[in-house]
Image (spheres, grey):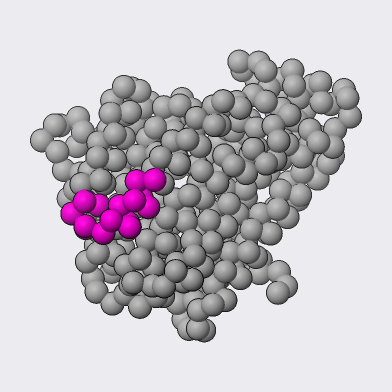
Amino acid sequence: MGSVIPLKKSANSAYLELKNLLGNKLQKVENLIQEKLRSEVNLIQKMSNHHLRSGGKRLRALLTLESAKLTGYKEDKRDINLAACVELIHSATLLHDDVIDESELRRGVKTTNSVWGNQSSILVGDYLLSRCFEMMVEDGDLEVLKLLSSTSSKIAQGEVLQLQHKGEADLLEETYIDIINLKTASLFSAATKTGSCLSGSNEKEKKALESYGRNLGLAFQIADDALDFYAKEKLFGKEIGKDFFEGKVTLPMIIIFQKGNKEEKNFLNEIMRREKRTEQDFNNTLSLINKYKAVEATFKKAEYFVNVSYDALAIFPDNEDKKILQNLTSFSLNRSF
């Protein structure tokens, strides 16, 4: 199948087309999330509102809704409820991530932990997860309950695995893929498979959408990791070099370590073992990234997962919903927001 990567404008329009198609349902998801997060504890209410106001693409909710639509779900309740569940899992992990990473900004807005502290942020993240599990139990589908609960477990395992390998300049690519598969791709996969469970799809369709979501999530995260070294300015409210300064070893770093000479490997080992890295460390690493064309190689790897994701939908009949999901694969690579 040739390359499915279009220009940025086309990539962005693929996401906007999906959002416009599901706009009414997505608003119901937003309303339900706000309703479920209401609390008589004033601090929980304030922090939840602050976190929700920071925005987000709601991509995982959209994937749940559109996968249900693709496989024939025609009602207007369970898909809303479970799309909200998927987003609550994602939001909870972001709250926990910001504490672990000591982040001060998310999407250009102050993080909850930078305003109210780490302890409150962890507990509010737990509150979001508990509300999510209440909603899953209310839905009553044991397959979905098992799927989303096991996904929450995978995300936590991915976080711990990443911490375990923090600062390892010689991190294996296989280990890196394991980390992002657990941390990011597992929730994409759960979102798309959940959609197929709603409509009573057969196992072949469920596996196809699971594969679509997983590979889309892998491409999404790999491209995001490339952007940490690629952009010349702030994107999506994210500081450039954020992963590097936090000691996270991602694919561009793995590539330059693999290709570097002995002196370059020693340099990378030395700076990644430090508690903190400097702007000069980042600039020197960026020179190696450019020397070995590591960003290009990283995007090439992401493109592979995009193509696998695109092809996973081949079993479905050609229609508007299939086309929208196929077009969305390019958004993971070429998005500008």
- Looking at the image, which residue sits at the far bottom? 318
- Is residue 303 shown in magenta? no
Q: How many numbered badges does the structure rendering display?
A: 0
Which residue is at 45% across, 41% downward? 154
- Write the residue at 32% across / 57% down: 144
Q: Is residue 3 left or right of residue 129?
A: right
Rendered view: 263 above or below 211 = above
Location of the N terminus (image quadrant): bottom right
Find the magenta span and give its range. 135-150
Name the residue located 71 percent from the left edge and 20 percent from the top edge: 271
Which of the 4 quarters of the picture holds residue 263? top right
Instruction: Name the foreground residue: 250 vs 145.
Output: 145
Q: Is residue 307 left or right of residue 285?
A: left
Please tell me whether residue 143 belongs to the stretch shown in magenta: yes
* Any part of residue 18 in sight: no
Q: Nearer the viewer, residue 27 or 166?
A: 166
Q: Can you give x and y, in whole percent of width and height, for residue 125 in the image?
A: 31, 35
One can see residue 146 in this view: yes
